[in-house]
Image (cartoon, helix red, strand yellow):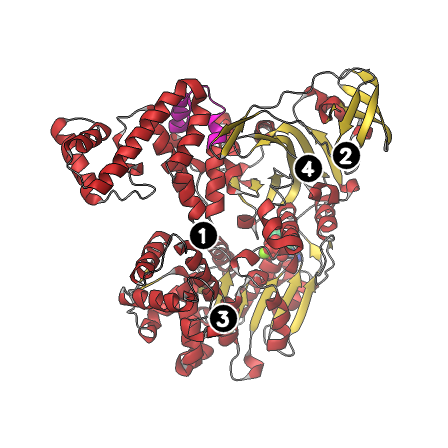
């Protein structure tokens, strides 16, 4: 009956069998924290300590909840029904349906999506006469969300805590927004936690009921809980009889990667204070990764300060394994080709595609890999997000490009005619449709007709004229300036990029990056029409194919998951560590990025391939990229440095001295820049022209020097400071 316990090591087993009283499992990646939690769940049921509906289990994603449900069922030998198992939000939504009346809602309340939330907030601001040009609603939304993350209802915010938004009016506007939600019998996402916590705080009878029913509480990924989640957990766990406070949290401070969403690492420290006498269990054997992968990850995270400190050692029998590979490539396209061909080779040798993942730092990075997968016919899925060309901002931008290419594309025209908002209301759009139908002409022609006949009121009329004239202008630019410059110009002049720049939601910067990536993608095609056709084909790619698929996702979405092979592309300064994290978070931001790198490497069981490109066109212009500082922080003896597909890199493999430990190639070559609005467009950098013997050169790492010998593309350089080195000609420039 206790066969399931034999699959645990002694420490894990102790964590499972210490069922009563508060317990904190603090342990590194892959040490079996989630396995402990799942087994503990099953153990509680198997030993009849509780009925299935008397255990509350919190996971970080719905996917993790599904997996836990399956694993519990497998141990029980029967499907597990009626479990309180899910994410914080899912659990709170379910509870709130029962107690909705306590916060002035009825049980069938609706949960607004972000668009509806914004619309409502704008109404509130409008009614209060707030100048929304000066005080963008997105800014207020961010403030409100932060308050909700901290469990603060309007009544709990003191005047001193009010934000200076719109002249200290944030708190009042927040209160009004909550009032309007109530009138609509609706909540926003943050309200689910907020309302439920408030109910537990203020209704002793409700809390007492939950204390009776939830005998055991289990929490995964505890390091990423925010304040309101913590309060909610603490309320539920602090049962009147101290001996019955059976809460078990598992987490890893080194994997705390959601501080930007209000997660408080301090919650780990608070645990011991709030639950005196808590047992702390540490797990130290990593069962997931091979020894070199684990050593590489451990070496990297050791650079962080302020860690709680944990031991982590290989626990697998096959502890040898491949070293972590670091592949240096010429540009981002070569990087996508490298990843694609390795996956293809692995597939040919019989590897399961579902055991492969590509983990990126920023959402826009998926595009290059998606296209590579499609070209190679490798099925893939984007986990925790949308495929690149399905993202809303990309669809909008594509609609502009479609109208540019084909003015009769009515569907595209309708999508963007009032995006961004130009004051073209339903009336104007209906009028356009009427004319189009009557005259059997495209909408765009009908729009001209409306302008000419004066059928519209002056404001929408002027807005429409401006848009149509702009399209005519962009179309005229096409032959001379080329589709890349026109696309960049169009996104700027139409006000579309501005719309996202004004947006202060956490997703907005990612959307802007996606738009830049779209312009970049355009550059890979000769013509606009060619690009549009390509995208149409990409979109048609079989969505519902069953079977094995490569997973593409952000590092944030990969928490808790594991794969045999993991690709970690784009390890370049500014991209990873991400510039925004550095700008906004300073040293703390850098440490969180490093934790993200740690999460990335520790997802791999057998193979981990990190790559960086020397050139990348992020802002529609080619820039030379500096390899990520994290590469230099990897312990050199756990890493093999490889070249990409280029022949010179193959040669490089035989030349470790040129490239030794931690010396990653730097490319410094100024690309030519063409101005196009606020966008910069330039040409892909050519590889270096030969540098003759005697030439004075500059190398980013070694500084100035003089070429003393030339051997094909390798140069022997006498550097002023660093002495004589053999370097690749592509990594030096004429001084
Ligand atoms: P993370 O910090 O990434 O969430 P974790 O600590 O939750 O990791 P698990 O996902 O539970 O770790 O376990 C990692 C891997 O090791 C899983 O494949 C799991 O099945 C396996 N594993 C855990 N404990 C043992 C054990 N005692 N013997 C063999 N394999 C184990
Ligand atoms: Mg886990």
Task: Out of 703 and 522, give the one closest to the viewer.
Answer: 703
Q: Residue at x 58, y 82 (%)?
A: 243
For residue 286, side relative to residue 447 (left or right): right
Q: Is mark 2 within 8 Å of ligand 1?
A: no
Asked which quadrant contains residue 663, the reply is: top right
Q: Residue at x 51, y 80 (%)?
A: 239
| Quadrant containing ligand 1 | bottom right
SS for callout 3: helix
Q: Main secondary structure of the magenta part?
A: helix
Marks 2 and 3, how far apart in space? 48 Å
Q: Which mark is residue 161?
A: 3
Task: Out of 193 and 47, give the one closest to the viewer.
Answer: 193
Q: Is residue 701 above or below residue 234?
A: above
Which of the two discs, 1 and 3, labels the residue nearer the N terminus? 3
Marks 2 and 1, how far apart in space? 39 Å
Marks 1 and 3, how far apart in space? 21 Å
Which of the two discs, 2 and 3, labels the residue nearer the N terminus? 3
Name the residue tied to disc 2: 701
Name the residue tied to disc 4: 627
């Amino acid at each position: 009956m206790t066969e399931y316990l034999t699959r645990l090591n002694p420490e894990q087993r102790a964590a499972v069998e210490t069922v009563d009283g508060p317990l904190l499992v603090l342990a590194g990646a892959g040490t079996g924290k989630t396995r402990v939690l799942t087994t503990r769940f099953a153990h509680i049921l198997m030993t009849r300590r509780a009925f299935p509906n008397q255990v509350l289990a919190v996971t970080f994603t719905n996917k993790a909840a599904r997996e836990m449900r399956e694993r519990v069922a497998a141990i029980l030998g029967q499907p597990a029904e009626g479990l309180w198992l899910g994410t914080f939000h899912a659990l709170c939504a379910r509870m709130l349906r029962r107690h909705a009346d306590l916060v002035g809602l009825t049980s069938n309340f609706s949960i607004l999506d972000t668009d509806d939330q914004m619309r409502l907030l704008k109404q509130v601001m409008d009614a209060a006469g707030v100048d929304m040009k000066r005080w963008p609603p997105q800014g207020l939304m961010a403030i409100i969300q932060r308050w909700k993350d901290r469990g603060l209802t309007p009544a709990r915010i003191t005047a001193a805590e009010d934000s200076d938004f719109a002249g200290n009016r944030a708190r009042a506007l927040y209160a009004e927004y909550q009032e309007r939600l109530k009138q609509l019998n609706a909540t926003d996402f943050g309200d689910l936690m907020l309302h439920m916590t408030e109910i537990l705080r203020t209704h002793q009878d409700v809390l007492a009921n939950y204390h009776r029913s939830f005998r055991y509480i289990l929490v995964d990924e505890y390091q990423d809980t925010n304040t309101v989640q913590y309060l909610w957990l603490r309320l539920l766990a602090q049962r009147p009889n101290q001996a019955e406070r059976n809460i078990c949290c598992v987490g890893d401070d080194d994997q705390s990667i959601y501080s930007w969403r209000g997660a408080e690492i301090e919650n780990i420290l608070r645990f011991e204070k709030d639950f005196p006498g808590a047992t702390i269990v540490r797990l130290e054997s990593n069962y997931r990764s091979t020894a070199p992968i684990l050593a590489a990850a451990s070496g990297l995270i050791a650079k962080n300060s302020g860690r709680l400190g944990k031991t982590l050692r290989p626990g697998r029998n096959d502890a040898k394994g491949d070293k972590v590979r670091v592949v240096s490539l010429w540009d981002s396209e070569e990087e996508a080709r490298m990843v694609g061909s390795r996956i293809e080779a692995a597939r040919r040798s019989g590897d399961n595609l579902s055991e492969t993942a590509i983990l990126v730092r920023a959402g826009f990075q998926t595009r290059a890999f998606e296209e590579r997968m499609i070209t190679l016919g490798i099925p893939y899925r984007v986990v925790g997000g949308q495929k690149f060309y399905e993202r809303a901002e990309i669809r909008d931008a594509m609609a502009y490009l479609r109208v540019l290419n084909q003015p009769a594309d009515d569907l595209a025209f309708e999508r963007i005619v009032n995006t961004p908002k130009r004051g073209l209301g339903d009336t104007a759009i209906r009028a356009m449709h009427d004319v189009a139908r009557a005259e059997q002409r495209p909408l765009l022609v009908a729009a001209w007709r409306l302008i000419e006949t004066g059928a519209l009121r002056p404001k929408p009329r002027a807005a429409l004229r401006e848009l149509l004239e702009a399209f005519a202008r962009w179309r005229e630019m096409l032959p001379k300036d080329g589709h890349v410059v026109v696309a960049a110009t169009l996104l700027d002049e139409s006000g579309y990029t501005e719309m996202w720049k004004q947006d202060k939601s956490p997703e907005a910067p990612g959307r802007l990056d996606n738009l830049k990536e779209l312009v970049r993608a355009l550059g890979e095609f000769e013509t606009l029409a060619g690009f549009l056709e390509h995208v149409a084909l990409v979109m048609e790619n079989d969505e519902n194919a069953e079977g094995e698929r490569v997973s593409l996702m952000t590092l944030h979405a990969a928490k808790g998951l594991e794969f045999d092979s993991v690709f970690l592309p784009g390890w370049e300064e500014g991209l990873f560590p991400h510039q925004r994290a550095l700008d906004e978070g300073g040293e703390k931001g850098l440490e969180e990025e490093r934790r993200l790198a740690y999460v990335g490497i520790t997802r791999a069981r057998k193979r981990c391939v990190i790559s960086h490109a020397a050139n990348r066109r992020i802002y529609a212009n080619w820039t030379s990229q500096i390899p990520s500082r994290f590469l230099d922080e990897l312990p050199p003896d756990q890493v093999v440095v490889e070249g990409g597909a280029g022949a010179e890199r193959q040669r490089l493999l035989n030349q470790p001295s040129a490239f030794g430990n931690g010396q990653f190639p730097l490319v410094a070559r100024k690309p030519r820049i063409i101005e196009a609005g606020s966008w910069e467009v330039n040409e892909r950098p050519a590889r270096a022209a030969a540098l003759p013997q005697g030439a004075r050169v500059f190398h980013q790492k070694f500084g100035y020097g003089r070429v003393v010998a030339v051997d094909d593309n390798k140069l022997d350089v006498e550097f002023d400071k660093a002495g004589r080195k053999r370097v690749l000609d592509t990594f030096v420039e004429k001084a």
